[in-house]
Image (cartoon, coloured by chain):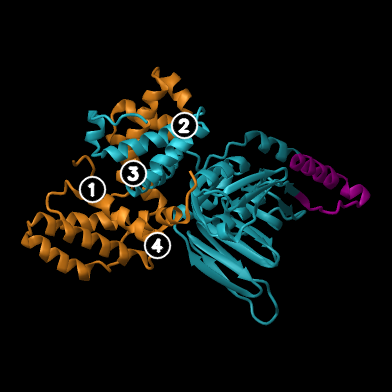
Amino acid sequence: MAVSGVAAWFIREVLPLEAALMQFLRRCVRDGSDVADLRQDVYVRVYEAAQKKIPHPVKPFLITTARNIVIDRVRRERVVSIETVADLAELEIAEDRPGPERSVIARQELRRLQAALDRLSPRCREAVVLKKVEGLTGREIAARMGISEDTVDEYLAIGMVALARHLHADGTDAGGAA
Amino acid sequence: MIEVGNEDPWKAIGASSVDATAARWLARRDRADWRAADQAELDTWLSASTAHMVTYLRLHDAWNRADRLAALRAPMRETPVVPDVHKRVSQPALKIAAVCILAAGMTAALTYRPVPRDVTYSTPIGGREVIALSDGSQVELNTNTILRISGGRSRTVTLDKGEAYFQIKHNAKHPFIVHAFGHRVTDLGTKFVVRGSGKRLEVALVEGRARVDAANTGVHQASAVLTPGDVAIAIDNTVSVTKKPATSLADQLAWRAGMLVFDRATLAEVAIQFNRYNSRKIVIADPAVAHLEIMGKFPVNDVALFGRVAKAVLGVNVADRGNEVVVSKSAGK
């Protein structure tokens, strides 16, 4: 894949803010189940905006985009809860609070990864451990576990999504929701 | 490609169908039989929608960061695995000791005194060596390093070049002294790493205490006592001290296990680090890519692996030109 400048920017500048973004979204959405969808919508909008012009600074832009998306949804669904309105007003002030995202250090990241591993099903965990801890290839893992390489890929893919979720967790999202 | 199913494991982790498809692409992409046609298919999928792209990038980033799990492989700290080097190194030291004893025995009769000679240890580019000193202290030399142990005074050493990690048995009566790049480091019971070049000395303290005295220019001599996590830089007659988190110090010392660890380092910095260890040099041909950042852990001597990762993650062009690995902006797309 040829990673464009925007893609590199997205990885470098936007993804590290995911914990803050998720925190914001969770406060806006009461039931919590739509948070991943909203995050996706925010990323799409931010990415498309960046293709025209890289926004700077990133965090206020990200949060403003998130707020607009939440407001759009509230309007569309015509179900405006008082809580949502109150939160959106409050968050305008609160958003500039320094988030933990910049201070996420290696050890913390390792802890999160371990926590994510612990939640995987045993076979899935085994595949991810053989890949990332032992550094085996897919073929070697398949041989070791006595399964096809396709199944190995499937386990790794599931593990990948679970790890991504935990890496960006801010501590309140213990995973497993939805 | 693969039809996105509704299997339970995906639901259990709250994955959308785009998540599942992107993750399967990423898993498949690592396979040995990945072909240009597969890449083209992936590129088509990625360009079909921004949602595909951002999902892919997000999972890709997480999957790369999961490489940190390799740290769980072995408890590498405090256990450098180099027993045979110990033997090889202590051998000449024994011989010297024998010569000294012999010489001392003859002194009375012949009034002959051997001139204490410096013992010099050096490593080539990419080399690493552990020196066990007679007092139980240990010094590990990193790549391209020269260390002299002063004759007759085993607790005084001079780092002429490169980088060394010291684990010193403290002795209040006989402080261990490292002369380096015009400055002086005095152990006060310690593990520390010393490196530098020219007149610049950098000391990072891992454990215990140490004192750094900047070069004495006759006008004013600066010194600083370091506590764990402190990084001192001495230039001319000044010493400045900053605090680093323990993880960052551990990353900096990963060379003891033959690794380089980068935590969002620019390609320019990465090239400097790799080039310390390899005669095959990384050349950043394009200022446009020099500031791109990368995270990861690499064997110090695996320039090729780094090239592959840079290409895959940053989309830069990596060309192998014999003794040089040239990194430039991707020509296509």
Q: Main secondary structure of the magenta part?
A: helix
In this view, the residue in front, A146 or A75, is A75
Residue A52: mark: 4
Q: Residues within 10 Å of mark 4 (few under 14, many from 20)?
A: few
**Residue at the image point whose x is 33% and y is 41% from the top:** A163
Which residue in the protein does label 3 denote? A164
Chain A: colour as depicted: orange
Of pointers 2 and 1, the one earlier in the residue sequence? 1
Of pointers 4 and 3, the one earlier in the residue sequence? 4
Tell me the chain of label 1.
Answer: A
Residue type, mark 2 in image: Glu
Disc 2 to disc 3, C-alpha distance: 20 Å
Tell me the chain of label 2.
Answer: A
Q: How far from the left and from the top, in percent, is residue B80? A: 57, 40
Q: How far from the left and from the top, in percent, is residue B264? A: 48, 55
- Callout in the foreground (4, 2): 4
Magenta span contains residue A88: no
